[in-house]
Image (spheres, rainbow, N blue to C red):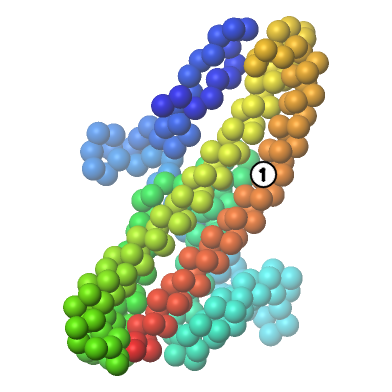
Amino acid sequence: MTFLAVEADPGEFPEILLEDLFEFPAMLFEGTNFAFNRIGLLYLFAAAIVAVLMLAAFRKGSVVPGRFQTAMEALVDLVRNNIIMEVIGTKGLRYLPLLTTMFLFILVGNLFGVTPFINMPANGRMAMPAFLAMMVWAVFIVAGLREHGIKYFKEAVVPPGVPKPILVLLIPIELVSTFIVRPLTLAVRLFANMMAGHILLAVAFLATNAFWIDVNAGFTEAYFFLNGFSGAVIGLFTLAGAVALVGFEILVSLLQAYIFTILTAVYISSSVEAH
């Protein structure tokens, strides 16, 4: 699958594959089911960063917090007050450590996409979004079982007051919606947004390089049938677009972490309350 043509002699358009943006050679255990590559390393980095931040802020917390502790407390309060208390209520406070950790882990992994020398969102691959979605699936089922016992499964798929003939159609829809669509959409939403952002950033920066490379070589023939000066001018626009996209990607990274976390809270709340 051809992605973009860059850096070649005038008139030559080499192919860059889309897979080159997401596929990385194995660092360890190549050729096995335990192959470990750059993406796996990013997941470990994200987990380590979150652990270090939380330990540094709260291991020896001060009654009069400094700036760093205040900032970390603000993140915890964001999850506690704006997600848990608003969506679940006081019953959801037991999930505060889980949801806070999830929010920070996803956020750090997303921000790797705009981190110099990394430039790859960890959640731009499906593995971790799928794992997190399956974890959420397990959590909201366990939450429902803890609150309602085995009756949870009936209450989750059988709305009260619905005529029995309608239940024949409604139960399969509720079953698929609750236990299949929820985790699937959680995973796909996070993965698709981060993958799309990574591709857009790559297009913008590669386009800038393509328009400027001939200018640096002496205003020779530029790509896309433009002369050197035109290539330089358009390159400025693509560079400005790339910078704007970096800011947009930071916003998307924050929003996707927040959306994933708040939807997790919504699913837990629906299990706890049931029908």
Q: SS at mark 1?
A: helix
> Which quadrant does the N terminus fall into?
top left
Tell me the residue at 38%/49% (across/down): 126
Q: Dot 1 corresponds to which residue?
A: 245
> Which quadrant does the C terminus fall into?
bottom left
- Where residue 217 appears, as percent x and y from the top left, is 73, 10
Image quadrant where residue 82 sits: bottom right
- Where residue 80 appears, as percent x and y from the top left, is 56, 81
Q: Is residue 250 left or right of residue 267?
A: right
Image quadrant where residue 163 sits: bottom left
Q: Is residue 41 above or below residue 7?
A: below
Q: Is residue 245 above or below residue 107?
A: above
**Which residue is at the front of the view, 247 or 58?**
247
**Which residue is at the front of the view, 77 or 63?**
77
- Where residue 69 appears, as percent x and y from the top left, is 67, 73
Q: Is residue 34 above or below residue 148?
A: above
